[in-house]
Image (tube, rainbow, N blue to C red):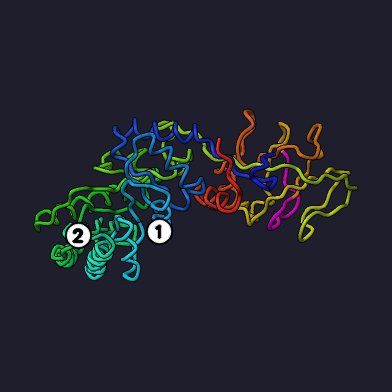
């Protein structure tokens, strides 16, 4: 039991495995400088600040978040590297992006104008506080132009280059706004059939060529996600954006896992806090969905669906206790759940329960939980990482 966690349930983050994974990615793409460390959603639940430290030690010089708040948190904790905010930032927050020197994603000239104006305002604010900076140049807001090649989320439509070029040329007239590259995102790269991914790749390349032919410089190209890094090296371009593979999970079961070796970074554990013997015919948890068929031993742990343990997993869930797989008894509650430990040898109060992870022989993976609940491993990791205290190993 980890006393510093202040509760008998926690997430363990294996930093050595994270270090191993980033080294595998560097070897695959050829250089740490080609990698953006995607640490959105608190590094997929692993803790962005600690993850950033490990990536930085491996030479990663660019990070990516989904939201402005995530990026600001990194800056306030001392991150000096380039930080890309992958989500669109509304005009009303442009001043924050300029103040914290963030790279934005943009696909609208009016939004770009807001950033340009914010850069000038941020410069004036600094100069009012420091007389010797009055003659320094205004630092422009850097931006990646977003093109929608088939994700349907954000960006100029790749097939409508005329509209995009007209609007992007308006950006070029802005004094404090600098286009640093072209951004898009794969939608099916984690599928075995790469037909649509190749279509997206072609649309991306054609759009980039159209910009260049129109006199619009594209200094940097970024497209590849985890699945692309694994199987589509032709879209690595200048900067890749691995996410889930950093954390030791594969993007899907359709990718060729032999192409990159990964180690899971997150485990979820708890201690038994209550143990009782009950007779046959005894019901457990909400809805009486579990009724013992024999005299049984029921253990309780303080972990539930508010900690990321999905309630729909209840009927399928198994945990590892003392080298034995044991089923969850009844519905997972908000903050607790019960385990049928009748067949677990020498079970006692305080015994460690592995909810997700391995004891060296038995394993319950994020993929196992995701498959049983109709979701993806990404969601499982993110959910476990939100409320449970983290212990770094």
Residue drawn at x 27%, y 61% is 126
Residue 376, percent from left and from top: 51, 49
Residue 20, percent from left and from top: 44, 31
Residue drawn at x 60%, y 43% is 11
Please tell me whether residue 63 belongs to the stretch shown in magenta: no
Residue 241, percent from left and from top: 34, 45
Label located before the other in sequence (2 or 1): 1
Q: Answer with left or right where residue 388 lies relative to residue 68.
A: right
Q: In which quarter of the image is the N terminus?
A: top right
Q: In terms of secondary structure, where does tag 1 sit?
A: loop
As drawn, the label of residue 29 is none
Q: Label 1 belongs to which residue? A: 67
Q: Label 2 belongs to which residue? A: 138
Residues shaded magenta: 326-337
Q: Give the quadrant of residue 311.
A: bottom right
Residue drawn at x 29%, y 48% is 223
Q: In terms of secondary structure, where does tag 2 sit?
A: loop
């Amino acid at each position: 039991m980890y006393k510093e966690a202040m509760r008998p349930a926690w997430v363990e983050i294996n930093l050595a495995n994270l270090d191993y994974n980033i080294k595998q990615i560097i070897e695959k793409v050829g250089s740490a400088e080609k990698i953006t460390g995607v640490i959105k959603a608190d590094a997929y639940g692993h803790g962005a600040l600690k993850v950033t430290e490990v990536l930085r030690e491996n030479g990663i010089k660019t990070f990516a978040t989904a939201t402005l708040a995530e990026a600001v948190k990194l800056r306030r904790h001392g991150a000096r590297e380039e930080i890309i905010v992958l989500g669109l930032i509304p005009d009303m927050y442009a001043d924050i992006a300029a103040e914290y020197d963030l790279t934005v994603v943009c696909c609208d000239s009016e939004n770009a104008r807001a950033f340009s104006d914010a850069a000038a305002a941020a410069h004036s604010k600094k100069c009012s506080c420091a007389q010797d900076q009055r003659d320094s140049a205004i630092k422009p807001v850097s931006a990646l132009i977003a093109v929608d090649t088939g994700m349907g989320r954000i960006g100029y439509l790749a097939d409508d280059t005329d509209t995009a070029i007209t609007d992007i040329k308006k950006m070029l007239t802005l004094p404090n706004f600098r286009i640093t590259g072209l951004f898009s995102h794969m939608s099916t790269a984690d599928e075995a059939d790469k037909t649509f991914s190749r279509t997206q790749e072609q649309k991306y390349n054609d759009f980039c060529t159209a910009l260049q032919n129109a006199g619009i410089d594209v200094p940097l190209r970024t497209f590849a996600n985890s699945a692309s890094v694994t199987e589509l090296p032709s879209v690595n371009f200048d900067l890749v954006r691995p996410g889930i593979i950093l954390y030791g999970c594969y993007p899907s079961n359709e990718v060729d896992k032999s192409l990159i070796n990964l180690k899971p970074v997150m485990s979820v554990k708890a201690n038994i806090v209550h143990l009782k013997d009950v007779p046959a015919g005894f019901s457990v948890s909400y809805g009486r969905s579990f009724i013992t068929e024999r005299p049984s031993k029921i253990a309780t742990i303080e972990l539930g669906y508010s900690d990321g343990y999905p309630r729909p997993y209840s009927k399928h869930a198994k945990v590892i206790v003392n080298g034995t797989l044991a089923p969850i008894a009844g519905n997972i509650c908000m903050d607790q759940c019960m385990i049928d430990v009748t067949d677990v040898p020498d079970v006692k109060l305080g015994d460690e329960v592995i909810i997700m992870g391995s004891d060296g022989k038995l394993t319950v993976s994020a993929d196992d939980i995701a498959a049983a609940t109709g979701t993806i491993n990404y969601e499982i990791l993110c959910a476990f990482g939100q409320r449970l205290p983290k212990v770094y190993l």
